């Protein structure tokens, strides 16, 4: 049940993914941000698109859904909670559901916050998480529709996955995220090392993902909102709950200028 993953640039700063089940030849796009970029990736690999797995309704994740469906006749799986906002969904899923691609299985996790119905796809065999706009490397998505406490709860759930889980997020924001993280967690040695590596990788034109969950747990301030250092960085008093610390971190990031 081997899976191959292809990463490619899409739009301005999206990261596109093709997931290919070797045994059956089935191939899924994780979200549909960019028709031409997906077409080029398919051609480069010699794969035929059979599925699209949608995480949420924002345009930069669904814009190519309809043209891809018309050309390939693909099966489109996506969030039940956002079915009214995403025309063309064939299979509706929510947290706890399973999704199959050939001989490979994915587990769906609800992650409300960025949007109310945002979800992510987890490959338990290969330990890969396609986190879209919920969890970025060294950051998280903006909270447009949900509540901070809901997003924090979703991140705690993600944090409970195995440490060797690889995070495949929806955007290449790591350089800016590192700049913010360094201001709120300046004494974090692991973060300093990661930030230096991120600068090197971006200068070389490399993606900064996938990244292990273990490294994110050590360096991403939003996954560490229950740590005293982050509460103190937000000038919040002892006893402040982690969801409130998380909300303060997200609010600070919203106005941060790198």
Image (spheres, rainbow, N blue to C red):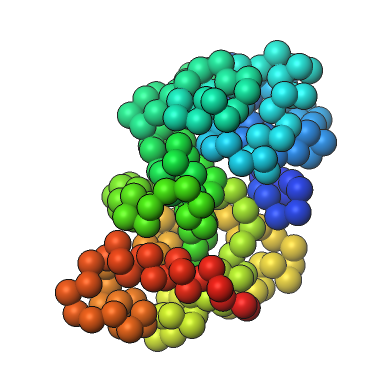
**Left or right: where 248 falls relative to 76:** left
Locate the C terminus and report the quarter of the image it occupies. bottom right
When asked about the image quadrant of residue 93, the answer is: top left
Query: Residue 24 in the image: x percent, y percent?
Result: 58, 16
Query: Residue 232 in the image: x percent, y percent?
Result: 30, 83
Residue in the picture at 72% in, 24% down? 66
Viewer can see residue 128: no
**Left or right: where 51 falls relative to 140:** right
Q: Nearer the viewer, residue 236 or 165?
A: 236
Residue in the picture at 61% in, 70% down? 176
Query: Residue 186 in the image: x percent, y percent?
Result: 44, 85
Query: Residue 180 in the image: x percent, y percent?
Result: 53, 76
Please determine whether, in this image, residue 245 is positioned above or below residue 75. Answer: below
Q: Residue furthest left?
A: 239
Please determine whether, in this image, residue 110 is positioned above or below residue 257. Answer: above
Viewer can see residue 12: yes
């Amino acid at each position: 049940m081997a899976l191959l993953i292809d990463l490619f640039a899409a739009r301005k700063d999206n990261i596109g993914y093709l997931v290919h089940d070797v045994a059956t030849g089935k191939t899924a796009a994780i979200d549909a941000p960019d028709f031409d970029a997906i077409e080029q990736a398919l051609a480069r690999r010699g794969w035929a698109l059979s599925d699209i797995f949608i995480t949420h309704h924002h345009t930069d994740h669904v814009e190519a859904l309809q043209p891809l469906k018309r050309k390939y006749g693909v099966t489109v799986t996506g969030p039940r909670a956002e079915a009214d906002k995403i025309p063309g969904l064939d299979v509706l899923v929510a947290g706890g559901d399973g999704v199959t691609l050939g001989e490979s299985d994915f587990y769906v996790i609800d992650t409300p916050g960025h949007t109310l119905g945002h979800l992510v796809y987890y490959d338990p065999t290969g330990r890969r998480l396609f986190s879209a706009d919920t969890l970025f490397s060294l950051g998280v998505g903006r909270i447009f529709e949900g509540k901070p406490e809901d997003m924090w709860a979703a991140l705690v759930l993600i944090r409970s996955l195995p440490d060797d889980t690889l995070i495949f997020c929806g955007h290449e924001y790591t350089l800016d995220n590192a700049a913010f993280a360094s201001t709120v967690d300046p004494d974090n040695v692991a973060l300093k090392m990661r930030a230096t590596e991120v600068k090197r990788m971006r200068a070389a034109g490399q993606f900064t993902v996938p990244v292990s969950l273990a490294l994110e747990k050590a360096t991403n301030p939003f996954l560490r909102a229950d740590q005293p250092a982050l509460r103190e960085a937000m000038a919040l008093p002892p006893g402040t709950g982690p969801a409130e610390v998380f909300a303060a971190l997200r609010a600070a990031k919203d106005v941060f200028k790198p």
